[in-house]
Image (cartoon, rainbow, N blue to C red):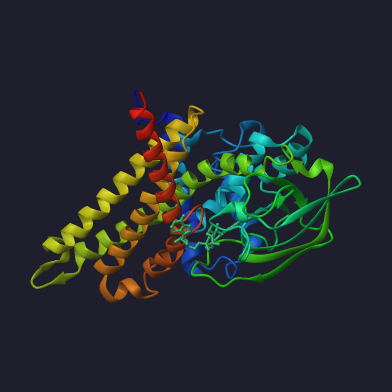
Amino acid sequence: MTFDLSHPAHVDELVARTTQFINDVVLPIEEEFGGDVEAAGGDTLRKDLQQQAKAAGVFAPHAPTALGGHGLGMVDRAPVFEAAGYSLFGPMALNIAAPDEGNLHLLAEVASPEQRERFLDPLARGTYRSAFAMTEPAPGAGSDPAALTTRATRVDGGWRIEGHKWFITGADGADFFIVMARTSGEPGGAGGATMFLMHASTPGIEVGRHISTLDRSMLGGHCEVRFEGAFVPDDGVLGGVDEGFRYAQVRLGPARMTHVMRWLGSAQRAQDIALQHVAHREAFGAPLSELGMIQQQIADNEIDLAASRALLLRACWKLDRGEHASSSTSIAKTFASEAIYRVVDRSVQMCGGLGVSDDLPLARLLREVRPFRIYDGASEVHRWSVARRAVRAQQKRLQP
Ligand SMILES: Cc1cc2nc3c(=O)[nH]c(=O)nc-3n(C[C@H](O)[C@H](O)[C@H](O)COP(=O)(O)OP(=O)(O)OC[C@H]3O[C@@H](n4cnc5c(N)ncnc54)[C@H](O)[C@@H]3O)c2cc1C
């Protein structure tokens, strides 16, 4: 197995252009509004920044070139997404924010030609915004997707959806939803889920409250959404009926990795701010950076960043080769989501009182990265599946 960790010149150039765009255009707006995307203008800001990103040649690094993107694979996306993630508003500006970016990948893999035209094309160009509706309040789907309770009932010409979702990122203002609903079987059973593409204007879809969470940078909130007899015609079925759980895996592996890429940008920014602070702040007759316990925190941050990038690239390399990368993406997601939090937390500590104040962006970054240990599979769920795979692999090796 050979790993080539270099990126082609056009990727390095895109990283440099993205960094400049983020520094010159995006970071000042994030700073002005304290990272609160709705206060900064919400969808109006998104459209404005995306126009500027297009003009700067940094828009949609992940989207197919035929749809106006740069067509980068997973390995090449990593440094570009990280550069965008240096600002909390950067991913939105480049059209690579969750959940749109993961939905784009899913549609590119699974959608019919007609669905691509209706949903993928406008999503890739930033005309549409989308949401992915899977999670439900107890006793419904959460860590265990098999608990899915939202039902799709067969009717003439299509399906009627009944159910209650929550924590649906971007739901308020989304143009369409990808909805997971049960088309067969009972909650708790394997299989029986189908994905549906539904315009947000469909009668019977009701977007409710924004659930107030630690973070503030994701457009359209994390909302409750009710489906009350919402009709979706047969051409709204994404892929095959009862294939939803399989397609969820198509979306989730890469989506976990792109979250790692973006949040690595935040972690690197936190470390840069801390480095700047400890180089200039003096205590006990010397800069803080010369004190051993500060050096340990700086070094631990460097180690966490480097290890996260290495695990990320290993998983991306497998995904680019079309390999089944579930274990690698679980390992990378679990390690990186925890390492990124540690990096930001140490950076707060190194900056003392300023670290927890709003004079620096560190407290904001800490709030933003914390939920990543829960969504896209909580750390415990990934550890559970990594352990089960390891045991199975060992049993297989021991079989005569
Ligand atoms: C900010 C944010 C954005 C989100 N966006 C979306 C979205 O756009 N669309 C969407 O569908 N969902 C979204 N979610 C929901 C997210 O996917 C779920 O919160 C996550 O899957 C966990 O489900 P749950 O909250 O029901 O927790 P539960 O399933 O109730 O689990 C609670 C805790 O139990 C523990 N646990 C679970 N299983 C195991 C196990 N096997 N072993 C040991 N411990 C375990 C874990 O610590 C877990 O955190 C979002 C969540 C957040 C916080």
Q: On the image, which quarter does residue 399 sit in?
A: top left
Q: Residue at x 40, y 37 (%)?
A: 392
Depicted 268 relative to depicted 59: above or below: below
Q: Report which quarter residue 235 is drawn in.
A: top right
Quadrant for the N terminus in the image:
top left
Where residue 275 sits: x, y (%)? 25, 59
Q: How many marks?
A: 0
In the foreground, 109 or 358? 109
Residue 370, position in %: x, y?
A: 43, 63
Residue 307 placed where, x, y %? 30, 44
Q: As drawn, is 105 to the left or to the right of 387? A: right
Quadrant in the rendering for residue 349: bottom left
Q: Position of residue 369 (x, y in %)?
A: 43, 60
Position above or below: 207 against 202: below
Q: Please name whichever residue, 367 or 188, is drawn nearer the observer in this view of the structure.
A: 188
Identify which residue is drawn at 37% across, 40% down: 391
* 282 left or right of 209 in image: left
- Whether residue 15 appears in this view of the structure is no
- Residue lying farthest to the front in this orientation: 400
Residue at 63% from the left image edge and 59% from the top image edge: 170
**Which quadrant holds the C terminus?**
top left
Q: Closest to the observer: 189 or 378?
A: 189
Could you tell me if residue 288 is visible in this image? yes
Residue displayed at 44% across by 42% down: 329
Q: Residue furthest left?
A: 285
